[in-house]
Each structure stands twice: as C-alpha cells, then as structure tokens.
Image (cartoon, rainbow, N blue to C red):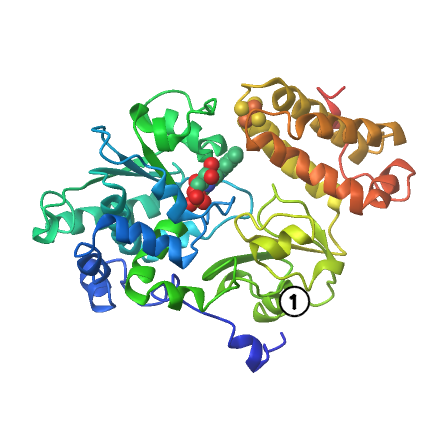
Amino acid sequence: MTQPRQEVLQKLTPVLTKRWLSPDAWQIGVYEQLDGYRAIRKALDVHPDDLIQLIKDSGLRGRGGAGFPTGLKWGFIPQGDGKPHYLVINADEGEPGTCKDLPLMTYDPHSLVEGAIIASYAIRANRAFIYIRGEAVHAARRLRNAVQEAYAKGYLGKNILGSGFDLDLVVHSGAGAYICGEETALLDSLEGFRGQPRLRPPFPAIAGLYASPTVVNNVGTIASVPYIVLGGADWWKSMGTEKSSGPMIYSLSGRVVNPGQYECGLGITLRELIELAGGMQPGHNLKFWTPGGSSTPLLTAEHIDTPMDFEGVAAAGSILGTTAMQIFSDQDCPVYNTWRWLEFYHHESCGKCTPCREGNYWMVRTYRRILAGHGTVKDLDTLQDTADNIFGRSFCGLGDGAATPVVSTLKWFRDDYLGYIEGRTAPRLSEKSLVGAH
Ligand SMILES: Cc1cc2nc3c(=O)[nH]c(=O)nc-3n(C[C@H](O)[C@H](O)[C@H](O)COP(=O)(O)O)c2cc1C
Ligand code: SF4
C-alpha cells in the first residue's frame, strides 16, 4: 500500500462524516456533546424564508444523483396555500455501488433528524417522513431510536423548544425495490400503493404526498443542512468549486487497497481519491470506473484526472450521480460487468413502460449469448439500437440508467465484446445460463 502524500491527505474534509468514528455518536447525549442540536436552536430563531435563502446562498445541490439546487427546490413550495406541506427524505439508496447514506444513518442518525427539523421548519411542513429501504434493518433501528430520543428531549413533537413549531417525524421502511428510490414511485409507495413512477407535471412541489406540496430530498442533502446553518454559506462554499459547493462523500469500491468513504471538497480528482484509498490493489491497473453508480456512463483510465464535481464529470461525458465510484482493473471485464448490472435493471424494472420492460429483457438475453460464446457482430448493433430506444424514451430514469453501461462499454470497449465473439476470450457463462434465452 502506498501512503497518500501530505497534500492529498489535506484534501480530506470530514464534515458529514466527522462523527462516524466517535463511539456512540448515534445516542442523543453523545450527539449533543459533539455540537448536535445546536443548529436547530439557531434555525428556529430565523424566519423560514431566510433559511431558504441561506441554503440558496450556500449553493447546496442535491446529493441523490441529479444535483438539483436544494434552496431552489424548497422555494418552489407555495406558501399560504392552506394545504399541508410534507418533507420526504429519500433513504432508499438502491443504486449499485452507492453506500454513503447507510453509514450516515447508522453512525450519525441525529444529524439527519436535526436536518429534517430545520428543513421542515423552512418549508412550513409539520409532518416529515424518512423512507428507508427495507433491507437496511439496523440503520432503521438506529433512526427510530434517534426519533424517539428527539421526541423525549422536545426536539420533535409540539412546540419544539418553545418556538411554536410542531413537527412529527415518521420512519417508514420500504420493501426493497430500486424503483422506490425514484421520488414519485417513492411517494406512491409511501401512500400504500404499488411503487411506480407518476406522470409529471404536476411535480411533487405542487402535488406530491397526498396531493400536497412536498419536498423530496436525499439523506446527504438534508444532513448537510445543520452544518450550513452553523457554519454559514461562505464557509460551505469555501469547500468545493464555484458551481459545485461543499464537501461530498465519495464511496470507493472495487480494486483499491482501502475501499470506503472519503469525504472531500467537490472537485477532487479520481487520481487523488485512489491515492487516498491506498492506491490500486497490487497487480491491478485501472481500466474503467463509474463516477456515480452504475447508471452513470463509465469512464476509463484516460479520465483519471477528471475533477469530481458536477461540471467536471459532465465535461468528461458522464454524470456525478451519487459519487459511488466503482473501480475496475485490467483483470475485470466490462462486458461481464455490464451484464451483471443489466440483470439488476431487468429485475428491478417496474414494467410500467415498454422500452424499459421489453428492452432490458432482450438485452439481458443478448449479453448471456455473447458471454456464453454464441454472440455475433450483429448482436452489437442490436444492443446499440435497443439501448438507443430505451434511453430518453422510458418513463423514468431507471430505463436511461439501464441503457447507460451498454452504450458506454460499446463506445470504449468494443474490442472486449469482439473478444467473446471471435473466440479470443474464453466464455464466461455456461450453456446452462442460456436456458430461457433466445
Ligand atoms: C430509478 C431511480 C432510483 C433512485 N434512487 C434514489 C435513491 O435511492 N436515493 C435518492 O436520494 N435519490 C434517488 N433517485 C433520485 C430521486 O428521484 C430524487 O431526484 C432525489 O431523491 C432528490 O433528492 P436531492 O434533490 O436531495 O438529490 C432515484 C432516481 C431514479 C430514477
Ligand atoms: S423506465 Fe422502467 S422502471 Fe421506469 S417506469 Fe418505465 S418500466 Fe418502470
């Protein structure tokens, strides 16, 4: 393992992760000792509109994948409309490779509760929900415990800290479907219906949960809020870049020596992140990687110096997404990996629209055929054509995400496909895996 250079180590900016290694920070007493529940006292003294302005000034952008400006989203909630408003926190975290929200909720659940209180106060919501995926049992337990502790201390419930503001916070476990991370499917699921995306408009800010104005934000977005309230917009902007402000939790997995979470200012490069993670594993050379989960176009070793912020990754032809950086080496096969992802997307497709439902079905079968050594060059054209007909023609982002690894591996790694077709690469799948394939 190579030790990171001092100048690279200095790029670590633990903000959201700073309590993760403190023993028992998930308990309210310890959280309070470590600066916890100080931000709500400050926030409840401020007019809600000023809080929205503060978040706008900080430049905070959503951490759930699309990077939408958070203050702007909060500002869309109509005020004085006489309807209930809701805050819904998206803790579904199903994107392959993504694993930043789970440790946050496990080791520092009160930071999310505190963020939920401030965000609800800002948008004038008296009821908030955390929608957490069903498999995350331990994190859900910690969250429920944190919510109970916060009620007992008067941070939740009626007349919070004598401010006149009331808030009830509910932790709701989903059943573990990737599509329920899509915000409108999540809302349907929360209402008790089958989780399928809704037609937009109307957007959730106008007609979201129970047809009322709703803000849906990611865990990392809401957990950032108390820090901005305490530190101010300028401090937040002192990390990151002009258009991508603040720290970001980068989740490195795969062929690095120390996979894990590295929180750094937005704009750090992959080269520096790999150095922080102890370098590539011995004998492995970087071949391809995802900047933000499997739904973001793959990049290659050539892109190692891409600044990992919203603009930098877009300029390289991909999307920052959830900063779930899966690192693959020359000993990994892009074709095989794409097939594994496609099996996931095919399984998770909700079936509502034809391009995604049918396209994924056929692409999975084509991949199985290629990987079993029965592919043809024409299959590559068919894959490209199918992916092109899914991308931009599906009802929601799941379809686009499924087409993405197909298009990017065909672009960068056509020869790896040809290896299976021309018999230069040994088949990875057996004949048995073709049963049911066409
Ligand atoms: C298929 C699919 C799955 C998604 N899964 C998640 C998720 O698990 N967590 C999340 O925060 N956003 C997820 N999103 C994005 C949400 O729809 C939404 O944009 C996000 O929660 C907004 O929060 P933010 O503005 O704080 O980023 C997903 C989107 C799609 C299309
Ligand atoms: S793109 Fe896929 S997941 Fe989204 S609505 Fe269509 S079938 Fe459902």
Q: Position of residue 16 (x, y in %)?
A: 38, 61
Q: Visible in this render: residue 86?
A: yes
Q: Is residue 93 visible?
A: no
Which residue appears at 91% of the width and 39% of the height?
A: 423
In which quarter of the view is residue 434 placed? top right
Above or below for 196 versus 73: above
Disc 1 element: helix
The residue at the point 42 percent across, 25 percent down is: 202
Residue nearest the observer in this picture, 38 or 4: 38
Q: Quadrant of ligand 2?
A: top right
From the top left corner, tell me how far across and down residue 195 is, in percent: 43, 24
Quarter holding the C terminus is top right
What's under tag 1, amino acid-wise?
Answer: Arg
The answer to whether 308 appears left or right of 168 in the picture is right
Residue in front for this viewpoint, 12 or 145: 12
Q: Would residue 21 appear left or right of 349 to someone viewing this image?
A: left
Residue found 78% across the figure and 35% down from its top = 371
Q: Position of residue 348 (x, y in %)?
A: 54, 29
The image quarter containing residue 368 is: top right
Residue sitting at x 55%, y 20%: 351
Considering only vertical position in the picture, is 99 above or below 28? above
| Residue that mark 1 sits on | 271
